[in-house]
Image (cartoon, rainbow, N blue to C red):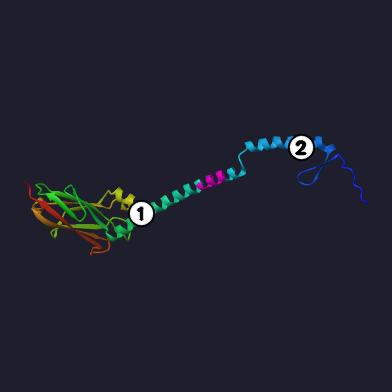
């Protein structure tokens, strides 16, 4: 015959299937109280995941800022290279004729006084102004000065040697009768009598009223 041992009231079952000595209930209560206090404090702290997200966002922001600066710098450098490529392809640029601006074609009123034609020219081999510039109005040479200041060209192409790449010609009013005229500009290197670049521009003179 099997006998059943009476349950010792000093042993209390726990939900996890373990047991807790009733004599340690005071200690257990203290531990429970301490855990509750710690848990209350811990809940007031931001979760570690939140700190990780904030740190990641800060890092991403810093990287983005650096990338934008790098891209901005690369973009500026690319613009300069494109401008240089254009300058090599078209090393002569006429800015204005008699105060009129244009791109390959200018229109001016019939002048009573000499007319100025200003522009710039570069020597791509040396990234400086040409040694000589000839300007012809309908095939006839006109007085031309070279080595004039063009800081804008130098800054745009980032080439200090182009600071004096400007030229200016004086067109006689007798050669600017009403109608279409051709202005030809030739640029020469120091060691050559043949122009390394030539550009022709149409100038339309409108009759005075």
Furthest-left residue in view?
Answer: 209
The residue drawn where x is 29% and y is 61% is: 89
Q: Which residue is mark 1?
A: 80
In the rendered image, the vertical position of residue 29 relative to residue 134, given as above or below = above
What span is in magenta? 53-60
Report whether 10 appears left or right of 177.
right
Out of 1 and 30, give the one closest to the viewer.
Answer: 1
Report whether 138 appears left or right of 19.
left
83 drawn magenta: no
Residues at circles 2 and 1 in contact by the CB criterion of under 8 Å: no
Give the mark, 2 or 1, whose residue is nearer the N terminus.
2
Q: Which residue is mark 2?
A: 31
The residue drawn where x is 13% and y is 54% is: 204
Q: Residues within 10 Å of mark 2 (few under 14, many from 20)?
A: few
> Which SS does the magenta portion mostly show?
helix
Out of 14 and 117, give the one closest to the viewer.
Answer: 14
Furthest-front residue in view?
Answer: 1
**From this viewpoint, is residue 40 visible?**
yes
The residue drawn where x is 31% and y is 56% is: 128
User: How far apart are the two marked residues, 2 and 1, measured between alpha carbons?
Assistant: 73 Å
- Horizontal and vertical percent position of residue 123: 29, 59
The residue drawn where x is 11% and y is 52% is: 205
Out of 84 and 59, give the one closest to the viewer.
Answer: 59
Q: Nearer the viewer, mark 2 or mark 1?
A: 2
| Element type where label 1 sits in the image | helix
Residue 25 — which label? none
Q: Residues within 10 Å of mark 1 (few under 14, many from 20)?
A: some
């Amino acid at each position: 015959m099997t006998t059943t041992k009476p349950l010792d009231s000093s042993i209390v079952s726990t939900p996890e299937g373990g047991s807790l000595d009733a004599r340690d209930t005071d200690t257990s209560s203290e531990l429970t109280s301490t855990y509750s206090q710690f848990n209350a404090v811990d809940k007031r702290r931001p979760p570690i995941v939140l700190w990780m997200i904030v740190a990641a966002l800060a890092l991403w922001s810093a990287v983005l800022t650096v990338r934008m600066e790098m891209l901005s710098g690369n973009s500026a450098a690319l613009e300069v290279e494109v401008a240089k490529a254009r300058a090599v392809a078209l090393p002569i640029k006429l800015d204005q004729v008699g105060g009129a601006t244009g791109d390959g074609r200018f229109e001016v009123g019939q002048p009573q006084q000499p007319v100025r034609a200003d522009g710039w020219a570069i020597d791509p081999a040396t990234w400086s102004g040409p040694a000589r510039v000839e300007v012809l109005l309908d095939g006839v040479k006109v007085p031309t000065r070279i080595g004039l200041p063009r800081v804008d060209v130098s800054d745009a192409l980032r080439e200090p040697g182009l600071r004096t790449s400007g030229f200016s010609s004086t067109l006689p009013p007798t050669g600017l009768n009403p109608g279409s005229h051709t202005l030809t500009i030739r640029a020469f290197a120091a060691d050559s009598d043949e122009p390394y670049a030539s550009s022709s521009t149409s100038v339309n003179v409108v009759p005075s009223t």
